[in-house]
């Protein structure tokens, strides 16, 4: 990597950084008690970024021979010469560090037969009755090794291992079909997969699918709601987190533009983005060699900071927050969240429920996603099978629940925050933006929102 940087400088670069990556991934799919596929792939290559007279150029290659790498350097310089008047990079302190997630059992070394057997046993346990019509179980393993070096003296190595199991059950009751999908992943070795009762996990999802298929949709309206940690993480990440990303703020595609220091939520709301959190994605440094520590976005309901890579920090006059992330060596870093969450408060779940005469307990298991408009601050999400709240107690299950609203209005009506906390990540997918997908973490405690629009599909 030092030779690559030296070559870039010799050819005229005023600044250069290089990223090497090796990514290994396995995915096992079991459907209806049969092995359907066992996929394995590896990705290896380098990417080179250069700055030259205000222009930024980038090129990548999987040809790691001297001639292949030199070709990438020359292509990056050629691109920089063609790009005039681009934004610069905010200064950062050069860091030398090596961070590797410690695992007890390398999941890529665990035998294929063992991994298939684990997933197959979970799938078989999902067949709890004639109501189950389809069951799909997936087991995923990934290891991501990234090296970074720059002409400023930065030198970073980060290795992250991620494993998980996903299950989906489809049930039919009285002619109504319901699909419930959920997954559990952790930055860990194979020991995580060995530690869980996945048969019980799949069986519980089947039971929920049967229960939901036999349930009604909620009467549409505006309700007080209690939101579980899974949906809190989803809501914050999608509807608020993207709006706090500096590049979207800079281009005006954010409801948070111009609101620094202003009130954007209830005084009970504190939102943080952090690099290393239990249960989240292990990401101590970003792809620009910047340490990803703890960034307070909202404190006491006031907007304190945006998320920045080096370019957005330069444009907005902020400080880089370690949020310059790239999907892989083929892509340039852009502003991305890491582990985005709401800090816990001091209420129990029972206290959140007790004074609600009629409301909805919104749950995330089985959620199907939705859509947001960061410039307007609107959101619509299809969440999982949920529960009505009647006279302060959990009542009947309801299916097809859809929540919608304006994120700033929603956060301003948060009147109680739970003392529990849950963080989630996933080996089966991540966050998409500008054609790039990265692993993220999201979560928080239970919260109570006094007004939220709830509908049923």
Image (cartoon, rainbow, N blue to C red):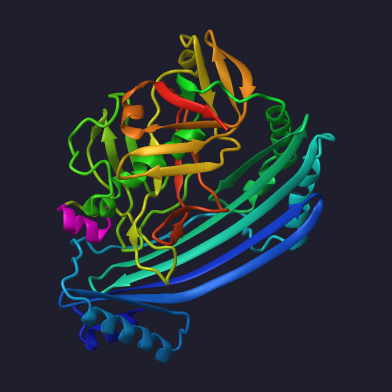
What residue range appears in magenta?
A: 308-317
Horizontal side, residue 101 vs residue 1: left or right: right
Q: Give the residue at the far bottom of this rendering.
A: 67
Q: Is residue 233 above or below residue 306?
A: above
- Whether residue 291 is visible, yes or no, is yes
Q: In this view, does 236 lie above or below 103?
A: above
**Quadrant housing residue 80:** bottom left
Which image quarter is the N terminus in? Answer: bottom left
Q: Position of residue 420 (x, y in %)?
A: 47, 26
Q: Position of residue 146 (x, y in %)?
A: 43, 66
Which image quarter is the C terminus in? Answer: top right
Q: Does the magenta stretch include residue 284?
A: no
Residue found at x 52% / y 54%: 102
Q: In this view, does 110 lie above or below 338?
A: below
Horizontal side, residue 189 vs residue 342: left or right: right
Horizontal side, residue 454 vs residue 131: left or right: left
- Whether residue 447 is visible, yes or no, is no
């Amino acid at each position: 990597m030092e030779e690559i940087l030296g070559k870039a400088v010799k050819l005229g670069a005023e600044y250069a950084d290089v990223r090497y990556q090796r990514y290994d991934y396995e995915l096992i799919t079991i459907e209806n008690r049969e092995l359907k596929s066992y996929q394995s792939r590896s990705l290896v290559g380098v990417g080179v970024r250069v700055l030259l007279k205000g222009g930024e150029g980038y090129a990548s290659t999987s040809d790691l021979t001297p001639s292949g790498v030199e070709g990438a350097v020359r292509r990056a310089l050629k691109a920089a010469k063609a790009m005039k008047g681009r934004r610069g990079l905010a200064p950062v302190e050069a860091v030398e560090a090596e961070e590797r997630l410690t695992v007890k059992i390398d999941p890529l070394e665990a035998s294929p037969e063992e991994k298939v057997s684990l997933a197959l046993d979970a799938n078989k346990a999902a067949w709890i009755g004639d109501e189950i019509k389809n069951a799909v179980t997936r087991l995923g393993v990934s290891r991501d090794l990234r090296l970074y070096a720059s002409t400023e003296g930065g030198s970073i190595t980060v290795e992250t291992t991620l494993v998980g199991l996903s299950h989906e059950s489809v049930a039919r009751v009285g002619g109504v079909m319901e699909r419930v999908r959920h997954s559990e992943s952790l930055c860990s070795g194979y020991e995580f997969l060995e530690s869980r009762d996945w048969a019980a996990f799949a069986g519980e999802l089947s039971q929920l699918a049967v229960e939901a298929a036999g349930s009604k949709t909620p009467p549409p309206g505006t309700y007080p709601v209690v939101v579980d940690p899974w949906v809190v993480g989803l809501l914050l990440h999608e509807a608020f987190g993207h709006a706090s990303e500096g590049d979207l703020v800079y281009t005006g595609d954010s409801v948070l533009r111009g609101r620094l220091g202003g009130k954007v939520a209830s005084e009970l709301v504190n939102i943080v983005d952090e690099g290393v959190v239990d249960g989240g994605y292990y990401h101590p440094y970003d792809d620009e060699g910047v340490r990803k520590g703890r960034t307070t976005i909202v404190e006491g309901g006031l907007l304190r900071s945006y998320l920045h890579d080096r370019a957005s920090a330069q444009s907005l006059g902020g400080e880089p927050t370690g949020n310059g992330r790239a999907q892989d060596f083929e892509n340039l870093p852009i502003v991305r969240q890491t582990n985005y969450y709401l800090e816990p408060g001091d209420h129990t779940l029972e206290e959140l429920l007790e004074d609600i005469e009629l409301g909805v307990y919104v749950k995330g298991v089985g959620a199907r996603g939705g859509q947001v408009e960061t410039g307007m601050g609107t959101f619509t999400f299809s969440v999982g099978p949920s529960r009505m709240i009647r006279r302060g107690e959990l009542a009947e299950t309801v299916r097809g629940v859809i929540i919608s609203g304006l994120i700033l209005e929603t956060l301003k009506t948060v009147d109680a925050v739970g003392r529990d906390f849950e963080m989630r990540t996933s080996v089966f997918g991540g966050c998409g933006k500008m054609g790039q997908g990265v692993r993220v973490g999201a979560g928080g405690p239970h919260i109570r929102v006094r007004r939220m629009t709830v509908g049923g599909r």
